[in-house]
Amino acid sequence: MTMKAAILENQGVMTYEDVPSPNPAPGHALLKVKSASICGSDIKRYVSGHRMYPLILGHECAGIIEAVGEGVDEGLIGKHAAVIPLVPCFECIQCLAGHYSACHSYSFIGSRQSGGFAEYVELPERNVFVVPDELSLEHVALIEPSTVGRHMLALGDFKAGQTAVVLGAGSIGLMIVQWLRILGASEIICTDISESNLETARKLGATVTLNPSKVDVVAEVKKLTGDGVDLTLEATGVPMALEQTVPITRPRGKIVLGGNQPQDKSLPLTFIEQMMRRELSIIGCFMSYSAPFPGHEWDDTIEALLNGSLDMDTMISHRIGLSETPEIFARIGAHDMPHLKIMIDPES
Ligand SMILES: [Zn+2]
Ligand SMILES: [Zn+2]
């Protein structure tokens, strides 16, 4: 049996091909992919190169369990599910502490093993996140990026009534904006250089939007809040935005860093001096997991989808067929296609 898949063959090279379809190994399940979405990290793997080739990318995906391997509950067959992409060892000291994203020997579906830009994906039973049938599988494919936003608020110990700045209104920034609205922020200030992204941010709950190419973000946030906000969430990976985090956060406030910064840049050390004077907490974020695996972030997202508070439709800018995936990666890699979430339908 073969299946269609989009395959990363090399840096900047993606093909659409027939490959052998996986048979679920013992302890594993086979998911028929119904919807997958492209993550900024997939684009980075395409543009900047990746640790291994060939590889089927795709870690934000949803579908229906079609078969199970030995030892797996057959009741899973026919269930709708999202892929939980992190495959921790569950045995190392960090896993035993519940810090799964710090696992000493993890795998990751769509970056260290075959992912969901294909008709089928094989995954360990523990990585099957069963969801209610009534949810749209497109929405289910977007659970993973939602959990990242939810996790960043948890890391920042966000409490209802607090004020926040979200730096960046890309997919993760917009998920953060939504979680701030859902969990009761009193002010949600969002920045981005794209006016259309800012418009989307306002639609999803931002109370104030600022375009750093037009205004001085630090001065504007101070004008609005006096000493700065309670919580700042960085979701751009742009050094300039990182530099803004400290002066816009109130003394004893918290900063959560989620954007992947370039490795060849540096910050002025006044960043550290100001951080010390304000006694700020700067917290890193990596993935979206907590104990018990995969974490409350995932259950919270299901709840927000069921009660309608999480708006996934507004997050989607494009819908494409699997065969178009290589062309779309080439266009995004060439900065030729402004986008929010791009949803891939393997059946169209
Ligand atoms: Zn992602
Ligand atoms: Zn581990």
Image (spheres, grey):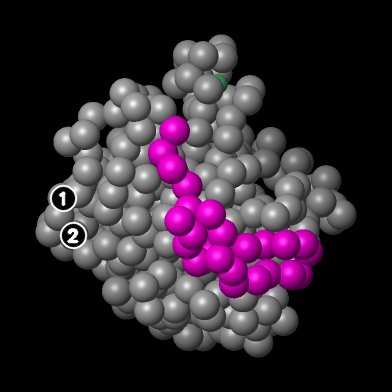
Residue type at mark 1: give it: Pro
Magenta stretch: helix, strand or loop mostly: strand
Residue 114 sits above or below residue 89 on the image: below
Q: Is mark 1 within 8 Å of ligand 1?
A: no
Residue 11 sits above or below residue 285 on the image: below
Is disc 2 surrounded by few (<14), some (14 to 19) or many (20+) residues within 10 Å? Answer: some
Q: Is mark 2 within 8 Å of ligand 1?
A: no
Does dot 2 land on a helix, a strand or a loop? Answer: loop
Between the C-alphas of marks 2 and 1, the distance is: 6 Å
Whether residue 216 appears in this view of the structure is no
Direction from residue 253 to residue 312 in the image, left or right: left
User: Is 7 within the magenta?
Assistant: yes
Badge 2 vs badge 1, beta-carbon distance below 8 Å: yes
- Position of residue 62 measured from the top left corner of the image (x, y, whole percent): 34, 56
Direction from residue 165 to residue 247 in the image, left or right: right
Residues drawn in magenta:
1-25
Residue type at mark 2: give it: Leu
- Position of residue 331 measured from the top left corner of the image (x, y, whole percent): 65, 83
- Position of residue 37 measured from the top left corner of the image (x, y, whole percent): 45, 65
Quadrant of the image containing the N terminus: bottom left
- Tell me what residue is drawn at x 62 percent, y 43 percent: 112
Q: Nearer the viewer, residue 130 or 119?
A: 119
Judging by the rendered image, the residue that carries numbered circle 2 is 135
Judging by the rendered image, the residue that carries numbered circle 1 is 132
Direction from residue 105 to residue 271 in the image, left or right: right
